Image: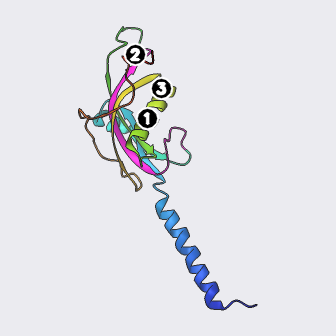
Amino acid sequence: MRQHSGDSNMKLVLLITLLVAGAVAAGPTECNECVGVDEASCSARGRQRDQVCATDRNSLGTTHCGTAVGKYRDNYPKRNTTDVNVDIDIFFRGCFDCANKKEACFALGGFLKGDESWTLMECEIECCTSDNCNTQVPTLSKDAITVFTPNATGPK
């Protein structure tokens, strides 16, 4: 049985539509990346750079660009200080999977713990879906996402 050329054309149009829709839904290819204590320290002296979401070893996802702020504790403070339990501000821009902001903050917490031995205490994050769109400057609110609670007693 021969197919009509109309059927083949319709299948081709459907395939192209799905491919284009997939490309649009794929998210950004690159985002602004930096780590500092605030936005000024992140963007100062060219510290902010482009991060390729699919290939950068520090990428935390491929669906969104994000800017996060929070407080962390450094488990290995510099030798000239004993401030182990002091909360330090963090400002972080980069690639994320941000459909769920709590999960995105937990991913950041895991990254900071593994890369720097920093314990992320709380986090606020703003996300977007186009290339290098993460220029936001979120603020830490009293309703910030709790990532780690150091004084938790645990199970009994």
Was residue 63 drawn as part of the magenta stretch in this picture?
yes
Q: Amino acid at mark 2?
A: Thr
Q: Quadrant of the N terminus?
A: bottom right
Label 1: state its secondary structure: helix
Q: Secondary structure at mark 2?
A: loop
Residue placed under numbered mark 1 in the picture: 106
Q: What residue type is disc 3 on?
A: Lys
Q: Secondary structure at mark 3?
A: helix
Residue 99's place in the image compared with 42, above or below, is: below
* Nearest to viewer (mark 1 / mark 3): 1
Q: Are marks 2 and 1 in contact (CB under 8 Å)?
A: no
Which mark is nearer the camera, 2 or 1? 2
Q: Earlier in the sequence, mark 3 or mark 2?
A: 3
Q: Position of residue 82 (x, y in %)?
A: 36, 8
Q: Earlier in the sequence, mark 1 or mark 3?
A: 1
What residue would you read off at disc 2?
153
Tag shown at residue 113: 3
Q: Is residue 129 magenta?
A: no
Q: Quadrant of residue 79?
A: top left
Q: In this orientation, does residue 111 appear?
A: yes
Mark earlier in primary sequence (2, 1): 1
Residue at the spot 35% in from the left edge and 14% down from the top edge: 85
CA gap, disc 1 to disc 3?
Answer: 10 Å
Q: Which residues are magenta?
A: 56-77
Spatial CA span between label 3 and label 2: 20 Å
